[in-house]
Amino acid sequence: MAADGLQRDAIMFSVKRLVIALLAALYLYYLLPATAVAFYELYHLTEIGAIYWGYSGFKAAGYYFGTWEYRLHTCIGLAIAIVVLPAVIHKIRNIRERKHEST
């Protein structure tokens, strides 16, 4: 019974969530300007004006984020948030459920 209680109280980190966090951080750090280029090329293929707005947004975001001194800190913080926040929220919900069951 004690082992079951410890397992139930443990914060579980998902490998899938870890991979998503790593990919999101790497995307922001390296591929944000490349997304602008993809939108630019897509605009010239389709001539849809809204796609050009997407290009403009990603171009500005890629430039300003690339020159921002806290870019690395932001990418690391995003990765940590993706991994940790869902596990903490799940733990808080389990604690609340057990509290309501015991009353």
Image (tube, rainbow, N blue to C red):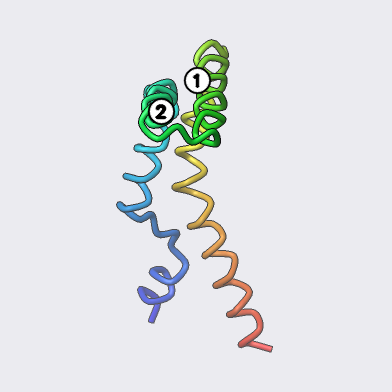
What is the three-letter code of the residue carrying label 2?
Thr
Task: Specify the quadrant that holds the C terminus.
Answer: bottom right
- Secondary structure type for disc 1: helix
The one nearer the camera, 85 or 50, is 50
What is the three-letter code of the residue carrying label 1?
Gly
Task: Residue 69 in the image: state x and y as whole percent.
Answer: 56, 12
Q: Which residue of the protein is positioned furthest toward the front in this rendering? A: 47
Q: Quadrant of residue 8?
A: bottom left
The one nearer the camera, 53 or 68, is 53
Residue drawn 44% across the image and 28% down it: 28
Which of pointers 2 and 1 lies earlier in the amino acid sequence? 2
**Residues marked 2 and 1 touching at CB (< 8 Å):** yes
Left or right: 23, with 54 as reference point: left
Q: Which residue of the protein is positioned furthest toward the right in this rendering? A: 103
Task: Residue 68 in the image: state x and y as whole percent.
Answer: 57, 14
Residue drawn 39% across the image and 22% down it: 37
Task: Specify the quadrant that holds the N terminus.
Answer: bottom left
Residue on which the image places disc 1: 62
- Secondary structure type for disc 2: helix
Q: In the image, which disc is placed on residue 93?
A: none
- Within-10-Å neighbours for mark 2: few <14, some 14–19, many 20+: some
Q: In the image, which disc is placed on residue 35?
A: 2
- Within-10-Å neighbours for mark 1: few <14, some 14–19, many 20+: many
